[in-house]
Image (cartoon, grey):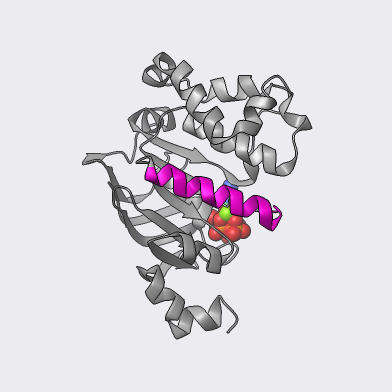
Amino acid sequence: MLQVRDIASRYGKVQVLWDVSIEVREAEIVALVGSNGAGKTTLLKTITGLLPPVSGSIEFLGRRIDGLPPHAIVELGISHIPEGGRVFPDMTVHENLEMGAYPPNAWKEKHKTFEQVYQLFPLLKERDGQLARTLSGGERQMLAMGRGLMSRPRLCLFDEPSYGLAPRVVAELFRIIRDLRSQGITILLIEQNVRHSLEIADRAYVLENGRVCLAGACDELLHSDYVRQAYLGL
Ligand SMILES: Nc1ncnc2c1ncn2[C@@H]1O[C@H](COP(=O)(O)OP(=O)(O)OP(=O)(O)O)[C@@H](O)[C@H]1O
Ligand SMILES: [Mg+2]
């Protein structure tokens, strides 16, 4: 579904990604793990067109998408749910969700999508008219996820959805991510908690200093000495 090949990305003169290649197949959950500053968020920004790569190629459903503007990439079916559950604070829950439905094809189906999102997050339905800035951290993350789904994506890129949330809320979000996959949405997930991400995902890539240093099936990675020592503290 998604083929990232030999990507290099930089902010101004500072190169942050080198020769990054990853692949996401349809209906997979793929995790991207690595320490702070490894380049995980940068890779998502590169995929979504916010930071066009300086070299390499990105294909989505057989089409080159590197070089396309972000809105065109959303319209092709990729939704990016950024770090920190960023939402529009002075808009209501409903208005925030509606903003996610801006691609023309999604707009036509927005009533149906609202129902689906409210079914997934009943809490958002209860808070429909509430200003986003009055939501709790967990509710805000749910809103960010809901807004990301309003564009009716085929592939969702989640950037640390569990950041700063209590274990009970994290468990709930992960349950929802699994639900999404069973509804046919493919997922690329950045997650700080390596153990959690290896448990929820099918495959994972480990990024270090802007390069992929390890990749494989999660059950294998969970048993690899390197991952156990470097990331699980075993
Ligand atoms: N807008 C920017 N301008 C300049 N440098 C940046 C910018 N954003 C990120 N960087 C640098 O790029 C590197 C990778 O950052 P990135 O945000 O991709 O890391 P990350 O793996 O997502 O880390 P974290 O786990 O802390 O979110 C870091 O060294 C960071 O300082
Ligand atoms: Mg990040």
* Quadrant hosting ligand 1: bottom right
Instruction: Examine the rendered structure and indicate whether residue 17 appears above or below residue 100.
Output: below
What residue is at 41 percent from the left and 64 percent from the top? Answer: 204
Q: Which residues are magenta?
A: 164-182
Asked if the stretch drawn in magenta spans residue 166, the answer is yes
What residue is at 56 percent from the left and 42 percent from the top? Answer: 82
Residue 84 placement: quadrant: top right
The answer to whether 87 appears left or right of 34 in the picture is: right
Locate the C terminus by quadrant: bottom right
In percent of width and height, residue 43 lies at 45, 52
In percent of width and height, residue 72 lies at 37, 28
Asked if the stretch drawn in magenta spans residue 147, the answer is no
Camera sees residue 162: no
Instruction: Examine the rendered structure and indicate whether residue 87 appears above or below residue 201.
Output: above
Task: Please state which of residues 67 and 63 is positioned toward the viewer in this rendering.
Answer: 63
Task: Please state which of residues 138 and 35 is positioned toward the viewer in this rendering.
Answer: 138
Task: Please state which of residues 46 and 152 is positioned toward the viewer in this rendering.
Answer: 152
Which residue is at the far top?
108
What residue is at 29 percent from the left and 47 percent from the top? Answer: 26
Mainly helix, strand or loop, the magenta region?
A: helix
The answer to whether 222 appears left or right of 126 in the picture is: left
The answer to whether 12 appears left or right of 168 in the picture is: left
In percent of width and height, residue 39 lies at 51, 58
Residue 128 placement: quadrant: top right
What residue is at 48 percent from the left and 22 percent from the top? Answer: 101
Instruction: Examine the rendered structure and indicate whether residue 74 appears above or below residue 179.
Output: above
Task: Please state which of residues 108 and 213 is positioned toward the viewer in this rendering.
Answer: 108
